[in-house]
């Protein structure tokens, strides 16, 4: 008989009795278990924090500068092209000398 793996991870928390009582009251008022309340609250806050850190908010002038930079990204870059050609030539010489 093979053991069934549990699809959940465990998080252990330590807190003061006062904070636990406060959270337990809020969970009971919400009609959910303490664990469900903590998970929902932590998940909501985690999403909020990540959304704030991953969202870029630009002023109208910054927005225009951003799109201008994107629009000009395809302009020829002679020095970059020359460096790439030099690298390709160097790499080809390395292959033939091996």
Image (cartoon, grey):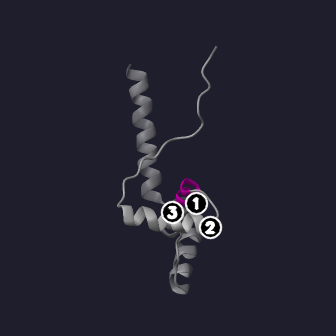
Image position, residue 67 (x, y; %)? 58, 74
Image position, residue 76 (x, y; %)? 53, 62
Q: Residues within 10 Å of mark 3 (few under 14, many from 20)?
A: some
Q: In the image shown, does 16 or 56 lie closer to the viewer?
A: 16
Q: Main secondary structure of the magenta part?
A: helix
Q: Residues within 10 Å of mark 1 (few under 14, many from 20)?
A: few
What secondary structure is marked by label 3?
helix
Which callout, 2 or 1, points at the residue further toward the start of the chain?
2
Residue in the picture at 55% in, 59% down: 43
Q: Which residue is mark 1?
A: 40
| Residue most extreme to the bottom | 60
The image quadrant that residue 2 belongs to is top right
Q: What span is in magenta? A: 34-39
Residue in the picture at 59% in, 28% down: 5
Indicate yes or no whether the magenta region holds residue 62: no
Residue 24, numbered circle: 3
Q: In the image shown, does 9 or 24 lie closer to the viewer?
A: 24
The image shows residue 88, relative to residue 58, as above or below, that is above
**In which quadrant is the C terminus drawn?**
top left
Image position, residue 49 (x, y; %)? 49, 66
CA gap, disc 2 and disc 1: 11 Å
Q: Residues within 10 Å of mark 2 (few under 14, many from 20)?
A: few
Could you tell me if the residues under marks 1 and 3 are in contact, i.e. CB atoms within 8 Å?
A: no
**Count of number-bearing discs:** 3
Residue in the picture at 37% in, 61% down: 17
Q: Which residue is mark 2?
A: 30
Which callout, 1 or 3, points at the residue further toward the start of the chain?
3
The image quadrant that residue 70 belongs to is bottom right
CA gap, disc 1 and disc 3: 13 Å
What secondary structure is marked by label 2?
helix
């Amino acid at each position: 008989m093979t053991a069934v793996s549990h699809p959940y991870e465990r998080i252990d928390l330590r807190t003061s009795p006062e904070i636990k009582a406060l959270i337990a009251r809020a969970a009971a008022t919400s009609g959910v278990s303490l664990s469900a309340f903590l998970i929902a609250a932590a998940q909501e806050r985690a999403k909020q924090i990540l959304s704030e850190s991953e969202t870029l908010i630009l002023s109208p002038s910054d927005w225009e500068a951003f799109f201008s930079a994107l629009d000009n990204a395809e302009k020829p870059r002679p020095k970059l092209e020359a460096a790439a050609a030099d690298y390709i030539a160097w790499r080809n010489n390395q292959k033939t000398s091996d």
